[in-house]
Amino acid sequence: MDLTLKVFAVIELALLIVHPTAHALSRDEFPPNFVFGASSSAYQVEGAANEDGRKPSIWDTFSHSGNGDMYAGDGDVACDQYHKYKEDVQLMANMGLEAYRFSISWSRIIPDGRGQVNPKGLQYYNNLINELISHGIEAHVTLNHLDLPQALEDEYGGWVSRRVVKDFTAYADVCFREFGDRVRYWTTLNEANVQAAFGYDVGLIPPQRCSFSIANCSRGNSSTEPYLAGHHMLLAHASAVRIYRKKYQGLQHGLIGFNLLVFGLLPRTNSTEDVRATQRVQDFFIGWFMNPFTYGDYPDIMKKNAGPRLPSFTQKESNLVRGSIDFLGINFYYTFYVTNSPSSLPMHNRDYIADISAEIERLYTNDSSTNVVPITPGVFQGILDSLRDAYGNVPIYIHENGQQTPYNSSLDDWPRVNYLHAYIRSLFVALRSGLNVKGYFVWAFLDAFELLVGYESSYGLYYVDRSDPNLRRQPKLSAEWYSNFLKGKLMDPKITKETEKNAERIRNMAYKSSGPVLGKIIIE
């Protein structure tokens, strides 16, 4: 185990030393204004894809196109939350959820992406929000979760065109006006870094744009489009925030933020080259957005390696983007080793990944556990520390964090119980250290339609029986554990014993890597 991993092992041990009564983990140990909830997104749970005026998004098109034979299925029905929202909200209330994070389908509100607003779409989200509020559950709303209206993609290329800024701002304005009197927490885009990099460089996710030489995409330019898409996402976000702060925030008293996927990043060796490469990956994946939010411009290494392919901000745009987040939402699952790889820099027509000039390898736990997603709360703590060091102690919401299990596996989902126990306990330590973490959302409330794996895997607290015409929901053991935690109830002694045994194993585990998997970061 190298020096970096020894540091994280010390952090893991500190979780027990700082909080020796971890077996009694309870909601009461967290501040009253710290929020616990669960997450979803529109295309993954709503269904009703062709009902009440909704038109396709780029995710609909992606799901119906074959997806490179990665999985079967689509979100046409999904969990049918469009028709079953009352039942689902009642389950949330029974569990004791304090908040529900969901996204609004842009093409359900404005079917063609701009222009006429769909009253049926407004009615659905009004009904959902009102149902949540009537049960004492906060609505945390995301405006775009990988589902840009297909009409805008067809008309001008979606995020690669500057025209999207105006259309997104108009859509956001409708949402603020119609729902903002009851919604206090807005997120403009989910995983913008993933959308830009993997939708426009390697063509792995909607809208599947890339250079033909990268992945046989039918359209796209991997050298320029990831940077264009990311730039327009930043401008669209900042424009929507300007509207919100000017017209609504003073009356509605809400907050508006932005969401990124974050990885644990560890240098493969202690060499100066690998340490610098690790920082470079961080700059390209997180600094790509956080530097403009904090300093008004892109990281220097991005400007150096991408050159004129990286768009520039005017002074007015820089001022608009800087300071445009009230909070940062982060999604965390995996950790990677980073190795310096300068050989990509001399390449002609480099793409975004080649500009990073690093190889990354998935970190696995070197044990026989059934955890598909390794449990690494010490690495998670390090991520939070690094964000504070680089960008100040910005308020952070953990928008997604969860364990993957095979669909149709046992309702006694011990891997998920152990996962939640470990990460929620790490948040207690984060708060004790002064980190400005404001909330935690489990991914996911339901077994949903998952990007790139369809219905083959699940993350839900509730199992959705797809063989049942009514898509019956069944609570898993993790739902019971989370509910007991939220309600301050004593845990079943068997559950407590198992989670503590697993916590000890986590503190003593070693790590191994998977080999280079940069192009497959979010598949598994």
Image: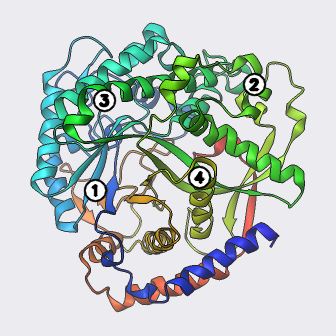
Nearest to the eye among marks 2 and 3: give it. Answer: 3
The residue nearer to you, when weighing 424 against 475, is: 424
- Left or right, 46 with reference to 235: left
Please name the amino acid that badge 2 sits on: Ala
Q: CA distance from mark 4 to mark 2?
A: 23 Å
Q: CA distance from mark 4 to mark 1?
A: 39 Å
Q: Residue at x 55, y 71 (%)?
A: 370
Q: Residue 471: x percent and y percent?
A: 23, 51
Nearest to the eye among marks 4 and 1: give it. Answer: 4
Please name the amino acid that badge 3 sits on: Tyr
Q: Residue at x 49, y 40 (%)?
A: 191
| Residue on which disc 2 sits | 306
Q: CA distance from mark 2 to mark 3?
A: 33 Å
Marked residue nearer the N-terminal end (3 or 4): 3
Nearest to the eye among marks 1 and 2: give it. Answer: 2
Q: Residue 202: x percent and y percent?
A: 65, 30
- Marks 3/4 in contact by CB < 8 Å: the verdict is no
Q: Residue 329: x percent and y percent?
A: 45, 47
Please name the amino acid that badge 4 sits on: Leu
Marked residue nearer the N-terminal end (2 or 3): 3
- Marks 4/2 in contact by CB < 8 Å: the verdict is no
Q: CA distance from mark 3 to mark 4?
A: 26 Å
Tell me the crowding category of disc 1: few under 14, some 14 to 19, or many 20 or more residues within 10 angstroms, Cα based: some
| Residue on which disc 3 sits | 244
- Marks 1/2 in contact by CB < 8 Å: the verdict is no
**In which quadrant is the N terminus drawn?**
bottom right
- Marks 4/1 in contact by CB < 8 Å: the verdict is no
384 to 518, vertically: above or below: below
